Image (cartoon, rainbow, N blue to C red):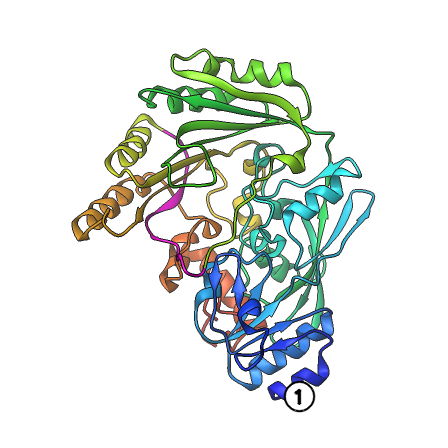
Amino acid sequence: MTLEQLRTEVSGAVVTASDPEWDDARRFHSGIGEPMAVVCVSSVDDVRAAIRLARAEHQPVMVRGGGHSAWGGVPGGVTIDMSALSSITVEGDLVHIGGGATWGAVAAELAKHGLAISSGDTASVGVGGLTLGGGIGLMVRQWGLAVDQLVGAQLVTAAGDVVEVSATSHPDLFWALRGGGGNFGVVTRFDFRAHPLDGVVSATLAIEGDPRPVPRVLRDVLADAPRALTVTYSDVPAMDPNAPAGASIQAVWVGRDVDGARAALAPLIDLDGVTVAELEARDYPDILMQMPAAEPDQPMPGFVGGNTLLRMLDDEAIDKLVSFREAHPASVVLLRSLGGAYGDVAQADTPFPARDATWFAMAGAFDVPGMLDDAGRAAAQEAWDAIESHGQGSYGNFTVSTDPAWVTRMYSPDTLARLAAIKREWDPQNIFCRTHNVVPAAA
């Protein structure tokens, strides 16, 4: 198949550098790309045709939903723009979601039905990328990962076949989709079981002074807290537009029980230096973060650091995280509570690592010109390596790295070997490699 043939086969647009729509088509949320072509699909058959083109041209496939992935900036390949496949259909608590939908639209539609799915933090993030990577959301302790709520999917394979995938239909492939990333095909429809939800309590606690006592108390609170409570501790610089500068705690309580949420957070609220900036019942769609799209003429700075999953948040890990933030003015530290429903899922049931983890941790220094030299980068990397030594596995959705080796940090050797065997079955030519790539196992 050629590009001209593809234009006659698909109902959506096929855009290349020779077309006037090129600059708009190649722009995605996190930057601007240089693919061979952008195929704006509007049907499953369009997806199949785009994959046939990629195979014919020996090009990798880049699937674009919300467009937050750093892989969109890697030159070459066929970008499949899924944004038109964004339907949301509710049948009781079963929700069918198009592969190009975003979580903000899903939350808004489900709220009309008194339902919700624990998804990511940001309204513009795509359902596809977040789900296939696992999906640590704002209600992870109540309902687990996004993939823990997934019950089925429609997938277009590298061979152009359309398969229905579930626990009883292609169960190995279903296992791989629940945390194995976009390695196995293009998901055109996700099927989730949603949960009744009439709203949440949203709390923000501001922190002044030495923050060290706060995560220690936070750890102790979450050890026995109701599953309704999920918390995020963050310490960010003034340059971050997505959160107030400094240290703070954002908490989400499932349901509108303000008194229950306040009681659970009381040991934190009573700490010196902690003040309540917000504690009120809100609709879930309203608490999702609105992240502005990147400006092409202002590329994102580099990031020296990483993330890991911690079985326990001990005092040494806390001290290292706080010290990292103190040592690097342009840096960010984040902790998200896990446990609860997240830990109910057996490790072997999904590829997602560290089901016995109780905290997700991230830290990194922004590589801003004039703020980090070679010595500063080395120091930041050494400090992060010391933090990562406390954890096990990494969360692929929370990195901007396109290093092919990153996948070895995400999965255990046994999990990676199983994924590679499934990859060999469904994508032996590895056309779905614009993700944290699992290379097909040798025949």
Of residue 118 and residue 6, the one placed in the foreground of this image is 6
Residue 46, position as x, y percentages in the image: 70, 74
- Quick one: SS at disc 1? helix
Q: Quadrant of residue 188?
A: bottom right
Query: Residue at coordinates 64% horizontally, 18% vertically from top-left?
Result: 258
Along the horizontal axis of the image, is 45 left or right of 334? right
Indicate the quadrant containing the N terminus: top left, top right, bottom left or bottom right: bottom right
Within 10 angstroms of label 1, few (less than 14), some, or many (20 or more) residues? few
Q: Which residues are magenta?
A: 296-313
Q: Quadrant of residue 67?
A: bottom right
Residue 308 magenta = yes
Of residue 343 and residue 161, the one placed in the foreground of this image is 161
Residue 115, position as x, y percentages in the image: 75, 37
Query: Residue at coordinates 62% horizontally, 32% vertically from top-left?
Result: 142
User: Can residue 372 be seen from the camera position used here?
Assistant: yes
User: Can residue 159 be seen from the camera position used here?
Assistant: no
Counting the numbered discs, the total is 1
Along the horizontal axis of the image, is 81 left or right of 89? left
260 vs 381: above or below: above
Provide the residue designation for mark 1. 5
Along the horizontal axis of the image, is 314 left or right of 64? left
Residue 14, position as x, y percentages in the image: 63, 77
